Image: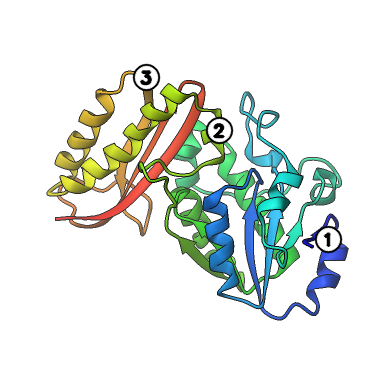
Amino acid sequence: MTEVFETIASLRLRLETAGTVAFVPTMGALHDGHLALVRRAEGLADTVVVSIFVNPLQFGAGEDLERYPRDLDADLAVLPDEVIVFAPPVDELYPDGESETLISSGTVGSTFEGASRPGHFDGMLTVVAKLLNIVRPDVVVFGQKDAQQVFLVKRMVRDLNIPVVVDVVETVRNADGLALSSRNRFLGDDERVAALALSRALAAAAASSASRHEALLASHEVLNDESTVGVDYIELVDPATFEPVGDRYSGPVTAIVAARVGTTRLIDNRQFDLA
C-alpha cells in the first residue's frame, strides 16, 4: 500500500532510511505523462517520492486555482505501491499564510508564460525550492512539456548550488500528437480535435527549419487554419537562454506555443535544429 505523508517531519523521518531518492513534484490530477516521470525516477534511485500539492503561489487573480482538479484517491490509485507520496495541506507548507519570501524568476520569468501569468514562475520556483529542501533528493524529475519551467528550475538549481540533479523526460503524447496535460480533461470533443493544431504547428516548424522566418511562417499557417484556437504566442527560443533567436541564427532551438481552446489554455513545445 502506498505510503502517504502530510507533514514535513514525518516525511523526513521516513526518508532517513530511504537510500538514494528520486523526486517527482506534481500538482496531482495524474495522467500518463506523470507516470512516465515516475517510471524514469524508479530507474534512477532506491526510493521515489511524488509530491501532490496544488501550489497557490503560482496561480494569479482570475486563474483556475479553485477549478484545478483535486482527487487524491484517484492519484494514489494509479501510482505504484512502492512510491512514497507527500501530500501536505496548504498550511503545512505555508503555516503563516502566503510566503513573504519568494525566489525571483528574473527576466525570463516575465516572458511567454510569465507574461500571461504574472508571478507564476516566482511561485513555482519558491515551492520547488521548498520541496527540494524538504525531500532532499539526489535527483528531481521534470517533463519537457513545461519547457520554460524546466529552464528556470535548472537555472535556479545551478545559481543557488542546490545539490540535486535535474532529469528531464521528453513530452508524452497521445497517439494523435496531443501533449498530455491535466487541463485536457476540460476540452470538449470538438475542442480536443482543434487542440491538435498546436502539435501540428510545431511539426510544421520543425519540417520548415531552414530559417526562423520559414519555421514560424509554417507554424502560423497551421494555426491560422484553426479558427477556434486563440494563439497567445509561438516563438523559437535558444535552449541555453530561453530568449528568442535572431533571423540569422542556426543551431538548436525550442519552438514554444501557447493557445486557448475554448476556455482551456494549453502549451506545447518541440526541439529541433535550425539550418
The dot on residue 8 is 1
Give the camera-side residue of 16 and 73.
73
Give the camera-side residue of 93 and 146.
146
Position of residue 179 relative to residue 157, above or below, is above
Question: Could you tell which of marks 1 and 2 lies nearer the N-terminus?
Answer: 1
Q: Nearer the viewer, mark 1 or mark 2?
A: 2
Quadrant where the N terminus is found in the figure: bottom right
The dot on residue 228 is 3
Q: Amino acid at mark 3?
A: Thr
Q: Is residue 231 left or right of residue 68?
A: left
Question: Could you tell which of marks 3 and 1 lies nearer the N-terminus?
Answer: 1
Position of residue 189 relative to residue 243, above or below, is above
- Residue underneath mark 2: 185
Question: Could you tell which of marks 2 and 3 lies nearer the N-terminus?
Answer: 2
Q: CA distance from mark 1 to mark 2?
A: 31 Å
Q: Is residue 256 left or right of residue 93?
A: left
Q: Amino acid at mark 1?
A: Ile
- Callout 2 crowding tier (Cα within 10 Å): few <14, some 14–19, many ≥20: few
Helix, strand or loop for disc 2: helix
- Residue drawn 25% across the image and 23% down it: 225
Relative image position of residue 31 (x, y in whole percent): 57, 47
Quadrant position of residue 139: bottom right
Residue at the top extreme, as displayed? 227
Position of residue 40 relative to residue 6, above or below, is below
Helix, strand or loop for disc 1: helix
Give the camera-side residue of 55 and 107.
55
Relative image position of residue 146 (x, y in whole percent): 48, 48
Relative image position of residue 105 (x, y in whole percent): 54, 49
